[in-house]
Image: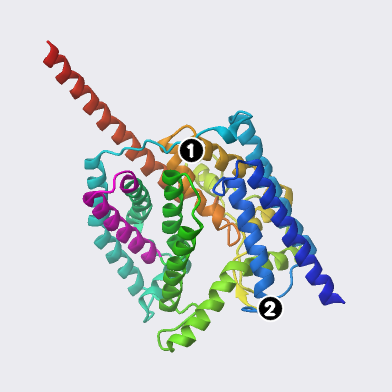
Amino acid sequence: MEQFSVILTDLIFILLHFFLVLFTYYRLGKIVMQPAVLFSLLWFIIILLHFIFKFTLLNKLEPLSLKVYIVFFVGVLFFSLGSIMVALALEPANRINIKIHSPSFNIDFKLRIVSTAVILVGLPFYIQAAYKIFLSSHIESFFIGLRYELSYGDADIGVLKYLMSLSYVVFAVNLYSFFKQRNKINRALLIISFLLTLTYAIFATGRTFLFMVLIIYLGISFLVNNRFSAKKIFFSLSIFFCLFMLFGIIMSKGGNVNKSVEENIDASSTYVGTYLVIGLNALDKELDQHKEGSAEGDYSTMFFKKVAMSLGLIPTRKINAPAHNYVFVPYATNVYTYYSPYISDFGKLYAWLMLAFYGGLHTWLYNKAVYKKSNRAMLYYTFLLFPLLLSFFDDLYLSIFSFWFQLIFFAELILMVNSLLNSNFYFRNQMVNAEGTG
C-alpha cells in the first residue's frame, strides 16, 4: 500500500509538471527556447527521469517526499510567473504574429583574429600553471591531483584563470560569425576557438564547464535559425555525454582506465544517471534536517560581502557559506539542486522569489535578443542558459557570480572595441565618399 502511495505521488507530480510545460508552451508563443518553456520542460524531464531510474538504472534510489515535490513544482510556477509578467510587459497582445529576426551581430574580423590569438597564446601558460598546481598535490594522476588542489587546497591558477572566461566569449562570437557567413576562414576560427575553449574547460577540471560549451552552441544555433531542432539537441547531447563519460573515466569518477570497456560503460551510465537526478534526493534529505534560513544570507550575498570587506565598507569576518557534505540516498552525492543555498539562507519563499526574478531576467534578455536584435542580449541570453539548464544539479547563478562578472567584462570589452572599429570604418568611408564627390 505504501509503495502504491509513493508511485501515485510520483505520477501526480509528473502530470502536474507536464501540464505546466503545455501551459507555458501555448501561452508563450509555442517556442521551446523561451525561458519559461525551457525551464518547465527541464524539470518535467528530470522528475520523469527520476521516476524511470528508480526502476531501472538506479533501482536503490530513495523515493522523494511530498514536501520536496512541492518545492520543485512551486519553483517552476514562480519562474514561469516571472517570465510571463515580463513577456506581457514587453510584447504586444499579438506577440505570436510578430516575425522573429536574427540579431545582426557583426564582429570585426581583425578583432576576432586578435581575441582568438590571445587565448591561443595564453593556453600554454595556463597549462603550465595547472601543472605546477598538480605537482604540489603529490598525487600520481594529473587530473585527480589538479582537481583536489583546486577544490580543497590553497592553490590558484592566478590571473591566467580569466582566460577561460574569455575563451567562452570568443567561442560564442566565432560561432555566431560562422553561422552568419560559412566561409573557410570563419570555419577555421570556429574550430580553433572550440578546441581552445574545450581545453580550458577540461583543465578547469569541473565537468559542468564542458556543458557550457554545448549550451553556447545550442543558444547561438537557436538565435540564428529561429527554431528548435530536437534532432540537433539529441545529437549534441550524445556528443556531450560521450565527452562527459570519457572525462569521468580520466578523473576516476564513474569509470577507471584499468577496467574493461563494458565495465566503464556500465559504471559511466550509472554515474550519469546519478548526476542527473541524485540532487533531488539530497535536497529532500537536507529539508528533513530543518536547516531553513540558517546561513545568515552568506551564500546569496557572498560575492558582494567580500567586495564590501575588501573596500573596508563592512567589518572583515569569515563568510559562513553552507558546506555541502556528501550524503547517501543511498548513492553518494554532494550536490543539492538550485534550491539548497537559497533555502539555507532565507527559506523556501526566498528561493521561489529569486526564481521569479531569474525568470523575468531570462525573458527580458530573450525578448531583447529575438525581437530587438540586441547583440548584447544575444550573448547574455546564451550564457545564462548555463545556470538555467543545470538548476537540477546546483545553483550556478550566485555560486559563480565572479565568473559571470568576468564574462560580462570580456563581452562588453569586445563589443566596445568592435563599436569603435566599426565607427572608424564608417567615418573613413564617409571621408572617401566626400572626397569622391568634392
Callout 2: SS:
loop
Residue ID for mark 1: 370
Q: Tell me residue 55's x, y (percent).
A: 68, 78
Foreground: 308 or 326?
326
- State the scheme by which the image is colored: rainbow
Horizontal and vertical percent for residue 193? 30, 55
Q: Tell me the number on the disc at residue 411.
A: none
Please identify the quarter of the rendering in which residue 109 is found: top left
Residue most extreme to the right: 1
Magenta region's main secondary structure? helix
Marks 1 and 2 close (CB-CB < 8 Å): no
Name the foreground residue: 125 vs 158.
125
SS at circle 1? helix
Q: Which residues are magenta?
A: 177-204
> Residue farthest to the front?
97
Q: Quadrant of residue 27?
A: top right
* Amino acid type, residue under disc 1 in the picture: Val
Which mark is first along the chain, 2 or 1?
A: 2
Query: Along the horizontal axis of the image, is 352 left or right of 394?
Result: right
Q: Nearer the viewer, residue 235 or 157?
A: 235
Residue 18 sits above or below residue 149 on the image: above
Q: Residues within 10 Å of mark 2 (few under 14, many from 20)?
A: few
Residue 65 in view in this figure: no
Residue at left offset 27%, top offset 57%: 192
The residue beneath circle 2 is 55
| Camera-side residue of 39 and 68 | 39
- Asked if 416 appears above or below 171 in the picture, the reply is above
C-alpha separation, residue under disc 1 versus residue under disc 2: 41 Å
Q: Position of residue 356 (x, y in %)?
A: 66, 43
Kindly tell me whether residue 75 is visible in this rendering: yes
In magenta segment, residue 175: no
Q: Position of residue 282 (x, y in %)?
A: 66, 68
